[in-house]
């Protein structure tokens, strides 16, 4: 059995939630050299215990075969450990020490050396430092003989607390380098090629990124590491200088940090934490465990693992009980943030009681997935109160002053002036336009009222999305940095982080895998949408005046694409809004638009761009193909196919009107539409 790391989950056909963001901090030759050293010392670890087994990664830290790993891979109850080293293995190993309070363990390979050992670093890494990870992901060491290797940065250092599953409390090092299933226990390596942390399965639901226990903590608090029985090498050499782009990104992040505030939102139903249990606690509740056969014990452990993985995925769909980020933009208390941060969740209430279901930590997965008696009813989890946490830690009530749907942002306003002056970000001075390939970083708060920040670098993947109101980046977006600024290395503000998940966040229901396909985007997917700062600057005065924008301003037709055919050559209408210009003109779901004002269309994008280039009130001619049941009359440009069509036509006539008609037998027809105005 394989123990899953909690922060790597795939929803439906989504990409991995944690990926490597490359800051180009070292040249390729340097990466190759470090990769060779790290992979030579990275090992796979398998630990058996009563009822099951855990698998993960470790790193050799002594030439005589000591392996540093996580206690989640080698727990204190482990009865046998097997190591696989590049070019060797499997080899038996014995447990030397387990410190579950720190989340780590040491085992020793029972085979002759010497072994390629990694040195340890005694310095806590800084945010923005280059970082590497290595791990036995998807049994890659068994299939190819070496671990996987990833390049990223240190994206944050912050404190976590112990929970029911993990006992570690203290400062962890977060990274954008890949941390996937099987990585637990693997090394976090700095730019000098030293192990600066051990990857563990402790995460922040606010961030959902890989973290490591720093070796600085282990060396200071764990006597077993570095003792005579576990000799290690401590490397104190300075880090190589970072690239200028990294220095610029750090400087830009530090410049916007004083303007960041925490956003706390109280909703009708509070955040939901799904029930988690450790394997020992779960096993102790199984009646007659001692009488079970080995096969039955393994089946029990497999059921436990499946339950935990399902809860992992579903917890990702819930807002955490932690603040998000906002940016102060004026001395009079205006704050810009993501509209997602002050939006409603979907809560599923028990049909028989109208109350939120409470999940028990002893229920099997089958019961957790089953709807309660009376079913469930979806309802908006409405907002009751919004508070802004200033850098000095004080909390102040705020209201949602205005929203801009196309941008995906909301403007908040403090209800009373704070006692300490604000540090607003001057949009007029720093707002800029994104360019494809620009190096950028999303900046967020570690915790409300604390000065420490998080930094997730990436590039501009697409300079224009959502009709130019947003752009796309591969920087990691999550609940913590939602609403935070996106900056470039020159110190420009390129935008504001929008919703990290789509379509919504939920409470009160656990979804099985087929239903998880509804979520097209999840935190840290590498597909992040940003409200463009230049477009925000252009509408800021309207927002300050209290004007909200629910739709894209400009012309409005009122149709949706047929998503199942959106990538084909046909422009197929998948829906028509009731009362829209399209509905009034007679467009229907399933119509194929052939031409727009005589210009042939071959993609939905072309159709959208031509509508966007028009003006409200314009009359446009569409040629469409619609499968019909037979011949029809076309009178004064209107299709008369039913008695209702004829009645509507006659009601439109005035005494003395004349008209011409024709008898048509093909599926192609002309329709004129008067475009409306989006409001």
Image (cartoon, helix red, strand yellow):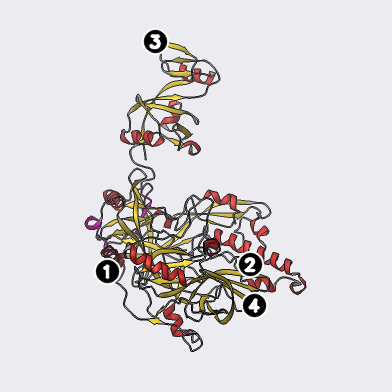
Q: Residue furthest right?
A: 291
The reply to whether dot 1 and dot 4 touch (C-beta < 8 Å) is no
Tell us which disc is closer to us: 1 or 3: 1
What residue is rendered at 42% in x and 58% in y?
341
Considering only order in the chain, which callout, 4 or 1, is on the residue closer to the N terminus? Answer: 4
- Residue 662 shown in magenta: no
What residue is rendered at 51% in x and 87% in y?
229
Distance between the alpha carbons at the discs numbered 1 and 4 = 60 Å
The residue indicated by pointer 3 is: 656
The residue indicated by pointer 2 is: 361
Q: Which mark is residue 655?
A: none
Q: Which mark is residue 421?
A: 1
Numbered range of the magenta stretch: 402-430
Considering only order in the chain, which callout, 1 or 2, is on the residue closer to the N terminus? Answer: 2
Tell us which disc is closer to us: 1 or 4: 4
Q: Which mark is residue 79?
A: 4
The reply to whether dot 2 and dot 1 touch (C-beta < 8 Å) is no
Distance between the alpha carbons at the discs numbered 3 and 4 = 98 Å
Could you tell me residue 629's position as x and y percent?
Answer: 55, 20
Q: Residue furthest bottom?
A: 228
Tell us which disc is closer to us: 3 or 4: 4
């Amino acid at each position: 059995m394989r123990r899953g790391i909690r922060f790597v989950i795939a929803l439906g056909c989504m990409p991995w939630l944690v990926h490597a963001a490359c800051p180009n901090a070292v040249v390729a030759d340097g990466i190759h050299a470090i990769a060779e050293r790290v992979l030579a010392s990275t090992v796979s670890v398998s630990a058996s215990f009563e009822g099951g087994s855990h698998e993960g990664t470790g790193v050799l830290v002594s030439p005589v075969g000591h392996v540093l790993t996580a206690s989640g891979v080698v727990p204190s109850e482990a009865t046998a450990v097997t190591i696989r080293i590049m070019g060797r293995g499997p080899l038996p190993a014995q447990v030397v020490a387990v410190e579950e309070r720190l989340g780590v363990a040491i085992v020793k390979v029972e085979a002759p050396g010497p072994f390629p050992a990694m040195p340890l670093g005694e310095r806590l890494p800084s945010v923005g430092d280059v970082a590497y990870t290595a791990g036995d992901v998807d049994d890659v060491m068994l299939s190819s003989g070496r671990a996987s290797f990833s390049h990223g940065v240190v994206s944050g250092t912050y404190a976590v607390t112990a929970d029911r599953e993990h006992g570690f409390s203290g400062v962890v090092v977060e990274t954008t380098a890949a941390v996937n299933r099987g990585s637990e226990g693997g090394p976090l390596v700095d730019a000098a090629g030293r192990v600066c942390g051990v990857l563990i399965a402790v995460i922040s639901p606010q961030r959902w990124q890989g973290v490591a226990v720093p070796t600085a903590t282990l060396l200071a608090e764990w006597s077993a590491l570095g003792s005579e029985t576990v000799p290690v090498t401590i490397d104190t050499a300075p880090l190589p200088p970072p690239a200028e782009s990294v220095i610029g990104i750090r400087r830009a992040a530090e410049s916007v940090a004083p303007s960041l505030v925490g956003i706390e939102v109280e909703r009708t139903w509070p955040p939901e934490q799904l029930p988690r249990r450790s394997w020992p606690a779960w096993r102790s509740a199984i009646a007659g465990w001692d009488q079970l056969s080995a096969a039955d014990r393994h089946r029990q452990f497999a059921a436990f693992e499946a339950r935990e993985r399902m809860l992992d995925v579903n917890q990702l769909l819930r807002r955490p009980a932690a603040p998000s980020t906002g940016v102060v933009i004026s001395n009079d208390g205006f704050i810009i943030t993501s509209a997602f941060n002050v939006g409603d969740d979907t809560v599923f209430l028990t049909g028989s009681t109208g109350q939120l279901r409470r999940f028990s930590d002893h229920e099997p997965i089958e019961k957790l997935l089953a709807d309660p008696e009376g079913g469930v009813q979806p309802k908006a989890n409405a907002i009751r109160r919004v508070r802004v946490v200033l850098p000095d830690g004080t909390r102040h009530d705020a209201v949602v002053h205005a929203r801009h749907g196309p941008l995906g942002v909301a403007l908040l306003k403090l209800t009373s002036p704070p006692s300490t002056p604000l540090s607003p970000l001057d949009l007029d001075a720093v707002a800029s336009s994104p360019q494809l390939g620009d190096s950028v970083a999303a900046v967020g708060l570690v915790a409300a009222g604390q000065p420490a920040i998080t930094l997730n670098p990436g590039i501009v993947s697409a300079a224009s999305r959502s009709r130019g109101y947003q752009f796309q980046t591969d920087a990691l977006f999550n609940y913590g940095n939602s609403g935070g600024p996106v900056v470039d290395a020159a110190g420009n503000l390129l935008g504001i982080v929008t919703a990290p998940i789509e379509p919504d966040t939920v409470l009160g229901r656990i979804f099985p895998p087929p239903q998880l396909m509804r979520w097209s985007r999840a935190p840290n997917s590498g597909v992040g949408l940003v409200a463009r700062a230049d477009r925000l600057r252009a509408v800021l005065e309207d927002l300050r005046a209290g004007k909200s924008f629910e739709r894209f301003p400009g012309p409005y037709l009122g149709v949706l694409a047929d998503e199942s055919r959106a990538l084909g050559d046909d422009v197929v209408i998948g829906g028509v809004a009731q009362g829209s210009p399209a509905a009034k003109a007679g467009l229907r779901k399933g119509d194929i638009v052939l031409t727009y004002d005589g210009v042939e269309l071959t993609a939905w994008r072309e159709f959208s761009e031509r509508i966007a280039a028009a003006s409200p009130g314009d009359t446009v001619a569409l040629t469409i193909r619609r499968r019909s049941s037979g011949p029809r009359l076309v009178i004064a440009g209107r299709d008369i196919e039913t008695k209702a069509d004829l009645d509507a036509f006659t009601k439109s006539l005035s005494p003395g009107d004349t008209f011409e008609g024709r008898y048509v037998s093909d599926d192609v027809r002309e329709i004129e539409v008067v475009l409306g105005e989006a409001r």
